[in-house]
Amino acid sequence: MLIHDDIYTWKGWGGNFNLAAGSCRLRIFDLTDHEDHKITHLKPIIVVVSDLPAEAGTSLRSVSVRSCCSHIASSVAEEFDLDPSRMMFVEYSPESFYGNRKQHLIAEKVDVVDLKWHGRKALHPQWRPLKSPLREILVDMMDSVSTA
């Protein structure tokens, strides 16, 4: 079940400089009541973050999700009152094309970000591909949200 789907803006650090502040697409899913009741998920809350596309007319993009994922995970867990031990943090990049005629493909990427939690702060991110069958379940849920 989809809990949240919107643009999420995180605050940076460094006082007035607000270093590494940015925005991303944030989707939060709760698999507790997922239709497949045969599976009990140890981490039923799935937080999916995606970079926003570059603004038209510029190749510049805001701070990437990858560069700030620990900070974003900490902020999301606190803001949405999520238990980090029951939350899976996923970085999602849809397939995209590039080149003069958009002839080159960058494949869709779905990575779990394993984080070490110290209190309410996430540290030491490590990325790994999300494997089946959870990958298919998550991609299907994201597709159904996009087409709804």
Image (cartoon, grey):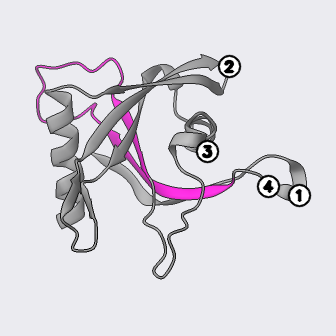
The CA distance from mark 4 to mark 3 is 18 Å
> Residue 26: image x %, image y %?
44, 52
Front position among marks 4 and 3:
4
Provide the secondary structure element on which disc 3 rests.
helix
Provide the secondary structure element on which disc 2 rests.
loop
Provide the secondary structure element on which disc 4 rests.
loop
In front here: 71 or 76?
71
Residue 24 sits inside the magenta stretch: yes
> Residue 7: image x %, image y %?
49, 62
Q: Residue at x 36, y 23 (%)?
A: 43
Quadrant housing residue 34: top left
* Picture layout, residue 60 above or below residue 130: below
Left or right of 45 in this view: 58: right
The CA distance from mark 1 to mark 4 is 5 Å
Front position among marks 2 and 1:
1
The disc, 4 or 2, on the residue closer to the chain's N-terminal end is 4
Judge whether residue 34 can be spotted in this image: no
Region in magenta: 21-50
Provide the secondary structure element on which disc 1 rests.
helix
The disc, 4 or 3, on the residue closer to the chain's N-terminal end is 4
The CA distance from mark 3 to mark 1 is 21 Å
In front here: 86 or 137?
137
Q: Residue at x 10, y 20 (%)?
A: 38
Q: Which mark is residue 18?
A: 4
- Could you tell me if the residues under marks 4 and 3 are in contact, i.e. CB atoms within 8 Å? no
Q: Which mark is residue 16?
A: 1
Q: Which residue is mark 3?
A: 79
